Image (tube, rainbow, N blue to C red):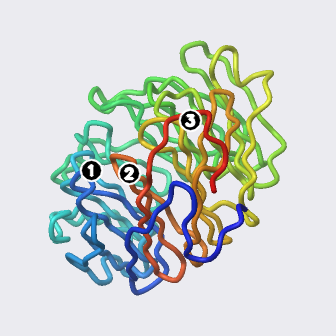
């Protein structure tokens, strides 16, 4: 990890604001075009903070009995959805936190939900099925049972949904209610990311590997040697770089040219404990990582996946989640002690920048 003092931002990180929530903060995200920052804690509390100052706009206690598990903010930033251990999905208003619709799926945990790229649909994984609702919370489609519990979901475009479970990734055309494609591989898939154009599928596996498919060519490849399960994956906005992590290191694969097959990945080694959150900036080649050691680091990458740290700060405890503001001029982190920190970020686009003072 870079040489940083607790709560002393370095490089492109500059003091912003901080606040606290009641318990371990596990999810966060920007809404209303960056004017609002929403945080969810492990016991089901939801909080809406003013994006520039950190002033608390609204608070909702125990949105989910037993605990909160996931949150997804609608692309228009006006509504968001949450799910938890109580088997309920809630659609809420970003402006005031008031509930719009509660969807009861049954007994069990709801760990994955995601708005479609255009915001027309909300996909929810529940046990071996996936449910799709419209913005009003009305059911539009339900999948057949998958062979095992659905471990990840992701949208490739406004109508096509990808699901991952043991042994396969399946693409569904939601508008026409049909299956588009199945990609099979014998392994337990624990995470999944799609490139922005939906062509490249990357999945982290239980056997400490990352499996890739190119949908346009049908070719696939497996990258092994990870010291842990690669549960954190993030593509840059061009789809040419994929950052992955299953330990304290970030491994970055480049898909330019004939890559990543037969090429060496870039490696970033800036943390002392496993990475707990990973996110590319909305535009460009900045990747931010949060770790169990409490550090948050931003690195500027080159096209081959290698790069240098350009900013770092200490979040105070295990980082539960990180999120870039839509304009990439601020980076937020939430931690296991319920501390919310937002740093202003001076974006530098020059690839000649190395390290920070």
State which tag comes first along the sequence, 1 or 2: 1
Disc number for residue 169: 3
Quadrant assignment for the N terminus = bottom right
Q: Percent x, y for residue 186? A: 72, 37
* Residue 112 placement: quadrant: bottom left
- Tag 1 residue: 74
Label 1 vs label 2, nearer the camera: 2
Q: Residue furthest front?
A: 357
Q: Are marks 1 and 2 in contact (CB under 8 Å)?
A: no
Q: Percent x, y for residue 75? A: 27, 45
Q: Secondary structure at mark 2?
A: loop
Q: Is residue 164 visible?
A: no
* Residue 113 placement: quadrant: bottom left
Up the image or down, 37 lies above or below 113; here it is below
Q: Give the crowd class for mark 3: few <14, some 14-19, many >=20 residues within 10 Å.
A: many
Up the image or down, 150 lies above or below 321; here it is above
Which residue is depicted at the point 45% across and 41% down? 154
Q: Is residue 303 left or right of residue 209?
A: left
């Amino acid at each position: 990890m870079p040489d940083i003092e607790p709560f002393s931002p370095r490089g492109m990180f500059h003091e912003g604001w901080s606040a606290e929530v009641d318990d371990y903060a596990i999810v966060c995200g920007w809404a209303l075009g960056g004017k609002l920052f929403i945080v969810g804690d492990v016991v089901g509390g939801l909080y809406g903070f003013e994006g520039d100052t950190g002033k608390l706009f609204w608070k909702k206690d125990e949105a989910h009995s037993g605990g909160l598990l996931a949150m997804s903010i609608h692309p228009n930033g006006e509504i968001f959805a949450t799910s938890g251990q109580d088997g309920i999905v809630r659609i809420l208003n970003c402006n005031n936190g008031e509930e719009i619709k509660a969807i009861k799926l049954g007994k069990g945990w709801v760990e994955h939900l995601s708005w479609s790229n255009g915001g027309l649909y909300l996909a929810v994984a529940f046990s071996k099925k996936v449910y799709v609702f419209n913005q009003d919370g009305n059911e539009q489609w339900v999948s057949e049972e998958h062979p095992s519990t659905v471990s990840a979901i992701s949208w490739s475009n406004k109508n096509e949904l990808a699901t991952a479970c043991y042994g396969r990734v399946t693409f569904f055309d939601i508008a026409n209610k049909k299956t588009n494609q199945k990609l099979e591989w014998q392994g337990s898939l624990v995470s999944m990311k799609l490139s922005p154009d939906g062509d490249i599928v990357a999945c982290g596996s239980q056997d400490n590997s990352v499996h890739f498919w190119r949908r346009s060519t049908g070719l696939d490849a497996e990258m092994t040697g990870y010291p842990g399960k690669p549960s954190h994956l993030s593509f840059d906005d061009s789809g040419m770089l994929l950052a992955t992590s299953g330990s304290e290191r970030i491994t970055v694969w480049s898909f330019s040219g004939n890559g990543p097959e037969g090429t060496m990945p870039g490696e970033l080694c800036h943390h002392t404990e496993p990475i707990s959150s990973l996110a590319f900036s909305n535009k460009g080649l900045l990747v931010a990582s949060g770790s169990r050691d409490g550090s948050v680091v931003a690195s500027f990458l080159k096209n081959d996946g290698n790069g240098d740290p350009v900013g770092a700060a200490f979040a105070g405890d295990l980082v539960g989640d990180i999120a870039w503001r839509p304009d990439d001029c601020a980076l937020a982190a939430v931690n296991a002690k319920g501390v919310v920190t937002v740093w202003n970020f001076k974006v530098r686009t020059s690839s000649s920048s190395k390290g920070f003072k």
